[in-house]
């Protein structure tokens, strides 16, 4: 069928399709316009809060793809500020290390041992972290991954023999998350009762499963189950 102005029905159909798809695009853009400020606020708010909690501004280590999200960093900083740990052990060096080192410099006491398995990254992050004022409270330690008796890979335990009395543990490494499984059995004897434990990446199915196993096998309490947003779970070793 031909319309008066010479437009065929197939052209009308294709125009209808185009209008429908444009309507969808407009609706999507409208939705994004409404959500966009929320997303920006979500990202900015923790950074503003962070700068209030520490006398120092953001450390010069950039938030990269591997780093904690800004809301996870805020939770980490808040927990350190509230709990005032003296002996922190961290697996997986990076932004979190910078924050904690700064906080220890703020209070003027405490020690942070941050364990890293990747030699190249250890070198480069070490150079960045050395320029921080908190560096005096920080010891970076290179510990390559090595098969344990069970055959599973984990940080070479001989590099951690002197570690004891840990009252704050951060688990954000190794980057190969399957190598995080032996963490508790390897470190539980080094933790003091009541030790605070923060675990990153808990939104991922493999970490959820792993945390479930840790909770079954070790005397751990969930302090703050509000991990969905921060993706950082707070546990505590029972007294
Ligand atoms: C999730 S990241 C550790 C992040 C750290 N806790 C932080 O807040 O930034 C875990 C591991 O990823 C590796 N990693 C982190 N950043 C990296 C980078 N920019 N390039 C290569 N590997 C990186 C390191 O081996 C690190 O121990």
Image (cartoon, rainbow, N blue to C red):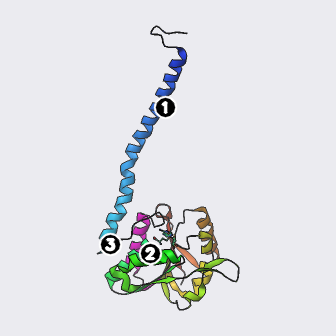
Q: Where does the image place residue 128, in percent across and percent down from the top left? A: 39, 75
Q: Is 108 on the left or on the right of 141, as rendered?
A: left
Answer left or right for 10 relative to 68. Answer: right
Q: Is residue 20 visible?
A: yes
> Please, what secondary structure does the residue beneath circle 3 have?
helix
Q: Nearer the viewer, mark 3 or mark 2?
A: 2
Who is closer to the viewer here, 218 or 110? 110
- Residue identifier under label 2: 124
Query: Quadrant of the rendered structure where residue 10 is?
Result: top right
Question: Residue 192 location, x and y as percent?
Answer: 52, 87
Judge: label 3 CB < 8 Å from ligand 1.
Answer: no
Instruction: Note whether 31 is above or below 8 in the view shown.
Output: below
Q: Nearer the viewer, mark 1 or mark 3?
A: 1
In the picture, measured across the screen, residue 31 lies left or right of residue 108, that is: right
Q: Is residue 2 above or below residue 167?
A: above
Could you tell me which residue is drawn at 52 percent across and 85 percent down? 193
Q: Is residue 100 visible?
A: no
Across and down, in percent, residue 117 comes to 54, 77
**Residue highlighted by disc 1:** 21
Which sits earlier in the primary sequence, circle 3 or circle 2?
A: 3
Magenta stretch, residue numbers: 68-91
- Asked if disc 2 is less than 8 Å from ligand 1, the answer is yes
Are the residues flagged by discs 2 and 1 in contact, CB closer than 8 Å? no
Q: Residue at x 47, y 61 (%)?
A: 229
């Amino acid at each position: 069928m031909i319309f008066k102005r010479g437009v065929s029905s197939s052209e009308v159909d294709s125009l209808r399709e185009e209008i429908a798809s444009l309507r969808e695009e407009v609706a999507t853009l409208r939705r994004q316009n409404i959500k966009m400020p929320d997303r920006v606020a979500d990202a900015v708010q923790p950074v503003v809060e962070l700068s209030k909690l520490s006398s120092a501004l953001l450390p010069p280590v950039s938030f990269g793809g591997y780093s904690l999200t800004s809301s996870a960093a805020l939770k980490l900083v808040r927990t350190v500020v509230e709990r005032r740990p003296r002996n922190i052990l961290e697996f997986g060096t990076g932004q979190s290390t910078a924050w904690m080192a700064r906080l220890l410099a703020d209070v003027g006491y405490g020690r942070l041992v941050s364990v890293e398995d990747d030699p190249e990254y250890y070198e480069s992050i070490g150079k960045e972290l050395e320029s921080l004022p908190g560096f005096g409270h920080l010891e970076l330690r290179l510990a390559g991954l090595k098969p344990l008796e069970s055959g599973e890979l984990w940080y070479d335990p001989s590099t951690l023999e002197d570690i004891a009395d840990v009252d704050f543990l951060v688990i954000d490494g190794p980057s190969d998350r399957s190598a995080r499984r032996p963490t508790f059995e390897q470190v539980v004897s080094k933790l003091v009762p009541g030790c605070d434990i923060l675990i990153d990446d808990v939104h991922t199915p493999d970490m959820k499963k792993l945390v479930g196993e840790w909770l079954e096998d070790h005397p751990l309490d969930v302090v703050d189950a509000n991990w969905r947003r921060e993706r950082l779970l707070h546990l505590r070793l029972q007294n």
